[in-house]
Image (cartoon, grey):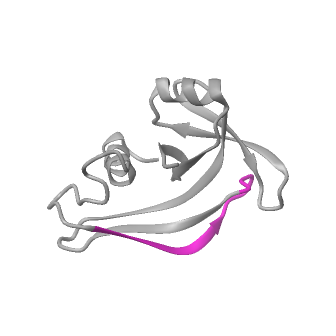
Amino acid sequence: MLEQKEIDVLKDIWNRDNKRFMVCPVCGGSLTIVQLSPVYKSGRTTVYYKTVIECDSCSFNIKVESCTVYGAVKSFNDDEVEISSWSSTGSRTTQVYKHSLDRKLLEELKSTGELVEFLIVDDQVVVVIG
């Protein structure tokens, strides 16, 4: 499980609205994301990828398993969010993930039913990227 400090770094790295988007939290250099081999998880319809985020200028790196899910917020509480989406075969599916998203954002997404892309890192939703 990710520590809150690591979650905050990942949110900053991938949050396009943040001035630190794809910027190393250590030296301010540019970050590179490398997705490696796929990881299939039991009970999950989404394919995860071994992902390495590394700085081009210093030794900073994070190794995680990540994926994106395109869907809508079905329900949520302070710890978990249920996302309605589609499986790789096109059937409807819902998955529950831990999350570190803002409650106001989740309320808005649930009330509008808007379809968005969720970035999931080590089974935790860290940011809405689209």
Q: Is residue 78 left or right of residue 111?
A: left
Residue 75 visible, this angle? no
Q: Position of residue 122 (x, y in %)?
A: 51, 53
Toward the viewer: 37 or 11? 11
Magenta span: predominant SS is: strand
Toward the viewer: 14 or 3? 14
**Residue at left offset 31%, top offset 60%:** 22
The stretch drawn in magenta includes residue 74: no
The stretch drawn in magenta includes residue 37: yes
Q: Is residue 52 left or right of residue 70?
A: left
Q: Where is residue 105 in the image (x, y as percent from the top left)?
A: 49, 29
Residue 47 visible, this angle? yes
Instruction: Tell me where the magenta segment starts and ends, as one range.
Output: 31-45
Q: Tell me which corner region of the image, top left, top right, bottom left or bottom right, holds residue 49.
A: bottom right
**Residue at left offset 71%, top offset 53%:** 44
Q: Where is residue 79 in the image (x, y as percent from the top left)?
A: 53, 29
Total numbered circles: 0
**Residue at left offset 33%, top offset 54%:** 13
Q: Is 124 rendered above or below residue 73? A: below
Q: Is 121 rendered above or below residue 78? A: below
Q: Tell me which corner region of the image, top left, top right, bottom left or bottom right, holds residue 8.
A: top left
Q: Is 125 rendered above or below residue 77? A: below
**Residue at left offset 53%, top offset 50%:** 120
Q: Is residue 14 left or right of residue 65?
A: left
Q: In this view, does 1 lie to the left or right of 48?
A: left
